[in-house]
Amino acid sequence: MKNSSLQLIDETWVGRFEAMASPCEVLVDTPEKNLAQKALDLALQETRRIEQKYSRYRNDNIVYQINNAKGKVIEVDAETAGLLDYSQQCYELSEGMFDVTSGVLRKAWKFDGSDNIPSQKQVSEVLQHVGWSKLQWRNHTLRLNAGMEIDFGGVGKEYAVDRSALLISALNIDSVLVNYGGDLMALGPRASGKPWEIGLQNPDNSLTKMIGKIELFRGGVATSGDLHRFLLKDGVRYSHILNPKTGWPVEKAFRQVTVLANSCMEAGMLATFALLQGESAEEFIKAQDVEYRVVR
Amino acid sequence: MQLKQPKSIRRQLTIATSSLLVAAPLQSIAVENSVDQMDDITVEISRLYYSEDDRVTVNKTQALITNELSEDNRIKVNVTYDTMSGSSPNGRIYTGGGDGSGTVAVTTASGFSFNAANNASSASKNTWLTPFSDNRIAANMEWETSLTNFSKAVLGGGASFENDYESYSTGGKLLWDLNQRRTTLTAGIGYNSDTVKPEAGVPEGLGELWCGTTAIDLDWLSSCADQDQIFYKPANKTVVDYFFGITQVWNRNTLFQLNYSQGDESGYLTDPYKQVSVIDPEFGNQELAVLYEKRPDSRLTQSLYFKAINVSSENITSYISYRYFWDDWDIQAHTVDAKIRINLGTKSYIQPHVRASYQSAASFSSSYISVDDAEFVNEPQYISADHRLSEQGTVTAGIKYGRKLGKVGKFGARVEQMRQKYNDGVLPDMKAWIVNLLLSMRF
Amino acid sequence: MQTKNKINVILNFVLSGILLVLSVGCAYEPVKPWHRGVLAADSAQLVPDALENESDEHIYFSKEAAKGGQGVGGGGCGCN
């Protein structure tokens, strides 16, 4: 089994590997294979490191310790502290709509396209364990109540994209596009000066065509949407974008929001914030002065 | 009355011609209308172009030389050269996207707090397709000889060679004419010995082609990580088939045929290039791992084939056939084929054609392995996501134009379109064009 | 599966249709050998064009699970 592959496709080096349950790619426009290989190796190493450290599926990392502390205080390293600080800022900026403790809501909601919506009782039970304000985060120490969890899933991939791009930039090549499962960051345009052409996924049927294209010269691109994860009952579509304050799906959520920003994390957060605004998603994103696309 | 006289002459004439006609056996693949030409050589050439939208293209050139050594002996030599290329579905989950519109990446939604689930496409090839390119050369020979006035035997053998596949075949059949040649009984047997030899070797069935780093919620697959793949040397496949048939002249315009066939396959019956994706619905269609498929090492196939030919007028001949096929992999298939040949004058004809088939899925056919499906709690014994073993329907429609060239030649050209639909709700429909040029010359 | 049932129904119709036409349209007539005139023509043979038939057999053998029916052999390629 190969961990990664590097191929020359139409004059661009395409490095591929699998991580974070996604196909990951690093595209480099350079005639030098060695350089492309170095970029790929850096990206692969860094992504695996982040995955190992922040995946909620492992039992040997800081996330596991945090989520199984049962009320005890945990001291975290500088990188994790940075992520927690970032989570707090996002929590405040979004007025509580973005909350990394809302991961436990998956225990009540299973978005498999069926009509199994949970009862209010079930939701309320799980909701007790949701709420950034319920935890204590200061001075590199974190204390969660028993039953609470931190889930970096909402930022993990974008973080890995930006970190990979950062490490690759040290190689002094600009025509690089990092693409981890649809979350992207370009250090600069293609060698020809032309932008990277990015397709927009059709939120209706992920299996077929795209609905548009965007041109990316430099910066991050991310999309938030409901793809095939939703519930349908009595003609009402329940998006998987849950409001962490109520435990119920955000009402009248847009199907999909795509944002271009300076970094992948920024783009991702803005797209997520937009979706959380329900029917005022477009209004919100317009006010942020970034390039965007929406699907209602 | 004058009518009586012509009648009696005619009677004598028909009696005289009957012995002439009776000399030629009822069933033949290319009947010569004039019996006085011995040691005839017929050369037939066919060029076939088969092309699927965005997928496989095949170019096939065939030459068939038939030498009538005598009234009772005929030899046929058939040579084929195929070139095949393109991409073919490999059984992995369809990921769509990545169309040729010049995009190098697709941005797609990632989960908020449920950690990913998306189908990002990549710069070029889709993972559900495997590109390939191959050439095949095959030859076979057949010798047909009369045993008695009412029976004959056919013996043949052949070989076929591709980069990754070799096949040797031999077979024979006996034909008996009964009932004043109104009925013909046929019995045949065939033997094929094939060697499957992919370049990288034959993989272990259900072995891991690739594993992602996300933990997989299946006990039997949880150790799927840095395992070495296991590849074996070439593998063998043997097929023995039998068939029994009856051909019956029903009336002067109609002919029927009914065949029963049985095939016994054993050995390596798996496709070494086909895989199955392991997915977790929580992550949408994201692959968590990819395993090689595995099929049983034996297969018993049976079929009943019925054909009717009706010459309804001087210019119209219809051909209709139905085949019911079934095997011990639980597959059942129905195929209907209808053609009408309409003569345009004495030299040319057109022939519209329609064919439709439907098959049910093999017992071990599955579009993917889902961690949520009770069926996969334990390691499956056999599994294949190959669409050719799944529920699918195919419809083909086309038209042929044929023309005589002088007294000894024939030309034909046909164009058809074939469409295939799959019932898994995932694989996109397939559409293909078939163009076939045929030329025949008698020397 | 609805599609399967529909197809079975259609096939039944087609088969009954064929049998009906054949039984009504063309009665069994003891055929004297010398009457086989029209059936002796090239175009009335079971396989009027061997190469055309072989091309089709190869195509469908490569794209479907079912095979054969008209005789023995065939296959012998790595396409199924």
Image (spheres, coloured by chain):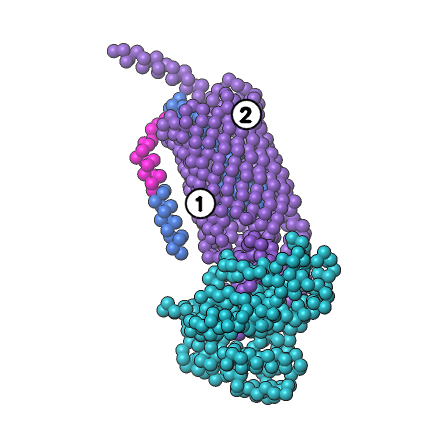
Q: Quarter of the image holding residue A162? A: bottom right
> Which chain contains the residue that carries disc 1?
B
Q: Quarter of the image holding residue B344? A: top left
Image height of B266 relative to A94, above or below: above
- Chain letter for cyan, please: A
Same subunit: marks 1 and 2: yes
- Chain letter for purple, please: B
Whether the magenta-drawn stretch holds residue B145 is answered as no
The residue depicted at 65 percent of the width and 45 percent of the height is: B163
**Location of residue B306 in the rendering, given as x and y in whole percent from the top left corner:** 42, 39
The residue depicted at 65 percent of the width and 63 percent of the height is: A188
Asked whether residue B140 appears in the rendered view, the answer is: no
Dot 1 amino acid type:
Val
**Location of residue B420 in the rendering, given as x and y in whole percent from the top left corner:** 47, 48
Image height of B237 relative to B412, above or below: below
**Location of residue A84 in the rendering, given as x and y in whole percent from the top left corner:** 60, 81
Please report contact status of discs 1 and 2: CB closer than 8 Å, yes or no. Answer: no
Tag on residue B395?
A: 1
Q: Colour of chain C?
A: blue
